[in-house]
Amino acid sequence: MQISPLALRVRSLSSFTLGPCRRLRSYSSGGATDLQVRARDRITQIDSRTPLPNLVDSFKRKHDYLRISLTERCNLRCFYCMPNEGVQLSPAEHILTDDEVLRLVALFVRSGVTKIRLTGGEPTVRKGLGTLIKRLDSLRSLGLTSIAMTSNGLALHRRLPELIESGLTHLNLSLDTLDPFKFEVMTRRLGHDAVLKSLDVALSSGGLQSVKLNVVVVKGLNDSEVLDFVELTRNRDLSVRFIEFMPFSGNKWDRNKVLPSAELLALIRERHPAIEQVQTVPSDTARLWKVPGHKGGVGFISSMSDQFCLSCNRLRITADGKIKVCLFDAKEISLRDEMRRGADDGKLLEIVRSAVWGKKEKHAGMDNIDTVTNRPMILIGGPQLRNIQRSVLRLGSAIAAIRASHSVATRLASNCVQRQSSTRSATDELQLTHIDATGQPSMVDVSSKEVTQRSATAVGHIYIPKIAYNLILGMDSQLAHHPQPSHERAWAKSLSKGPVLTVAQLAAIMGCKRTPELIPLCHPLPLSNISVTLAPEAAPQDERMQHPDHWLPFRIRCTATVTSEGKTGVEMEALTAVSIGLLTVWDMLKAIAGKDMIIGNIMVSHKSGGRSGSFVREEGK
């Protein structure tokens, strides 16, 4: 094979030796200049102008849709995608480079693929995603018509305009519940608002040809929200797609949790009897329906109850470069290994064609799908679900507990996520830093960090009835000795414990110093100063806390500021101080107000120092 003139020109610019043009694309673009990258892309276009025969299997199905996973990493732990015990991620060097992704996509496009979908893991955690999409967009001259992506939306809303500008045309967002409480239980993450914000940005962007919402329906978990999701389509140009719960390795699939699409349609038809089917092409995975008068529509992906294998047009490439011709088939062939051994495009195409020709007519029934040797979903790439650490049968009670609870433990759990994410750049992926790749707890290694001056301020409130407020105000006055007759005994018991705010202040300081003993993965830090104040006040009208049968008009505000010279932040120390201080107030006042008090709104309001810099958070935000 002759080397193109453009390849010869690149050789003079590069420090490495080039073989034939196709060999050039097997190198990583990590250290390449922008000119070299553009030159390689141009070589790909020159080499790829000749169309190749379409990818057709033995059942005469033409494959023009390629799903390619960009990463195995994800910023959620989804029960559908990831087993409870976690998964072993591939080493970074095993993941396809940008050049390898571009080379494979170009080969498939030359062979008749017109649509590609970028998946994960979570594709937005891959560095350089916008640049990669722009490079893929250069393949339109070869026949590529659309670049789609499936995302959980957690870190997407700020980046989406850039991705659309780079060439993204279609977006699928995954959201299995409209209930923020249920979202937190299912994902073990905060972020419901972030996903909804990404949806709003996508719908208002104007640059996307379609926006779809993927909802995996699990009986007894989120099937009660189906009609709420349909309502989203009333005034939005949105396609909500209900996906049947599918079996994969480690996701504890149960056929009794599968809600067939026919039952979902019947449920929707009870509310919207005029719903009508929309004509689609045979290869569409979803059967589409529309409620008259609604701007958007709904779809049903019934992989379990009503297979659409006979019209399947999809192929998949995993993040580590293996081709899968069927989502439910465990057989894989590594294209990455062949590329890195020096295979030319002809050899790669021969491997691809052989794999496609061996594709089965249809996958096994739902009870016979191979969930032992097939990968977990996170290592394949596809519809994303949210994580359920406990079994589905226990979720109802867990969600009820979250709704009923305003406990310090719940607030600490929320703020623990804020502490972990606050040490990361806003452009980094969202993930828990105290969980390793296998899902096990792990202490963060801070040995490489520099010692810097750090501070954090946390605030919180305990809402109290008037009798408790009067007792605190009257600790040093005659008012304390003249309660109503019905309250005299409880009043005296509370007074016998000592001054409420002083005891709570001391407890807060002591608790702050013992944070690493209370929170297992916190580092012991040399604290320079701990300042704690507790102030009784009338709660603003719009911030009063509602007890089941009355409003609590007063509160005690606890503020803790902690400073240190260390390698990690002191947010947890400040939060612990506030939490212990408020718990002590509750203990001191429980004799007269134990049934009425509510602790809430514990948050980090200020931090400074560290790589992520400073922030100030307004209360209530």
Image: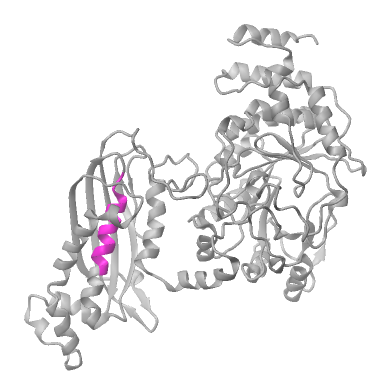
Residue 78 in which image quadrant: bottom right
Q: Is 18 colored magenta in this rendering? A: no
Q: Is 576 colored magenta in this rendering? A: yes
**Quarter containing the C terminus:** bottom left
Residue 25 image point, x, y percent: 68, 21
**Quarter containing the N terminus:** top right
Q: What segment carries the magenta color? A: 569-583
Q: Residue at x 71, y 24 (%)?
A: 339
For the residue pair 580 and 225, the one nearer the viewer reads as: 580
Residue 129 appears in view: yes
Residue 387 image point, x, y percent: 56, 57
Q: Is residue 58 above or below residue 395?
A: above
Residue 388 image point, x, y percent: 56, 60
Q: Residue at x 68, y 17 (%)?
A: 24
Most distant residue in the front direction:
372
Q: Is residue 424 above or below residue 304?
A: above
For the residue pair 69 and 129, the one nearer the viewer reads as: 69
Q: Residue at x 85, y 56 (%)?
A: 279
For the residue pair 322 and 554, the one nearer the viewer reads as: 322
